[in-house]
Image (cartoon, grey):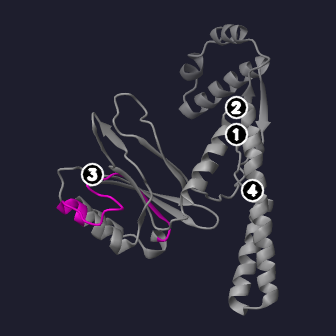
Amino acid sequence: LELLWVKFISVRTNLLVGVLYAPGYDLDVFTKLRTSLQLIPPRLRRNLVLLGDFNCPDYSIEETSVKTRRTRELVSVIKEFAIFQRVRGDTRQRKTSCSCLDLVFVSQLSLVRCVSIVPPPSSKNDHAGIQWFVDLWTCSFPSPPRPTWIFDTGDVTQLRKDIRAVDWKRFFTVQCNSDLATACFEAKLIEIARRHFRLKMISSKRLTRPSLSSRTVDSLKRRDAAFRLWNRSKEMSAFTRWVECARISKRAAKTRYLRNIATSSRRNPDAVWKHEQSRKAFLQFQ
């Protein structure tokens, strides 16, 4: 069984993604898959995505009757763990035969969106690609500032001349302590570099680009706290507060999503077109 599990940790929930390759000659591959799924705690199986090459050409969502033993075992695993298949169409074309071998199973239908089949990545590959989207909210963990060399104003040729002019063997032949010799060697090299380049401290805002700001995270926490309060008390005031917080969070998420599309369209002219295509595909699926 060739199976890889990856766990994604986000603010609201965790996502477990499994990538599977089921060889066609292995008749017990889905029995092994059942054993692997049983080892996963139930709290992680709530948000589960299982995808890969299942090698079951006779499997179909519309047809309830299956022919082979492998496919019957796959259907049994699907019913036991209550997962849903999201791929519609053929994913492999070999000469005149077409089949759907690459599948995507989810534990919730709303977990992934805009599932589509894309052309093969190369002409020698007969398997098509599968594209889908999932929304994960991650926290912004600021990293400490770090020094970075700025090379826009220096002269590399003169730097090489200064480095060749130094007798570097002397640092290790004169010094008896290797740690002291390494420290002196590094200090001399930095001294030469400072003559031609400048060392600048880059803050965390320039090093990382967090997906959510601290203000957004606080808004989501207030919304979840309002929901828990309404779930405990069942008061109308708590319900109204929860609805208002949810409306604000949804409006902010939509604004942030459209702003990212507008910003990326400056570098990629196809960003708006891809957004319209994904929106149309989502409306057709609905």
Residue pictured at 34% horizontal, 28% vertical: 124
Q: Quadrant of residue 82?
A: bottom left
> In the rendering, at what x and y percent does residue 123 appear?
38, 28
Q: Secondary structure at mark 3?
A: loop
Of the 4 image quadrants, the one containing the C terminus is bottom right
Residue receiving disc 2: 269
Q: Secondary structure at mark 4?
A: helix
Query: Magenta stretch: dominant SS?
Result: loop
Residue pictured at 78% horizontal, 37% vertical: 201
- Mark nearer the N terminus (3 vs 4): 3
Q: What range is drawn magenta here?
A: 46-72
The reply to whether the C-beta atoms of the residues labelled 2 and 1 are less than 8 Å apart is yes
Residue receiving disc 1: 272
The reply to whether the C-beta atoms of the residues labelled 1 and 4 are less than 8 Å apart is no
Q: Secondary structure at mark 2?
A: loop
Image depth: mark 3 or mark 4 in front:
3
Q: Quadrant of residue 197?
A: top right
In the image, 40 versus 236, the foreground residue is 236
Q: Is residue 90 above or below residue 172?
A: below
Residue receiving disc 4: 254
Query: Within the magenta stretch, is there residue 44?
Result: no
In the image, 9 versus 231, the foreground residue is 231
Residue receiving disc 3: 57
Label 3 and label 2: CA atoms lie apart by 39 Å
> In the rendering, at what x and y percent does residue 267 appear?
72, 31
Check disc 4: other Cα within 10 Å, few if <14, some if 14-19, many if 20+: few
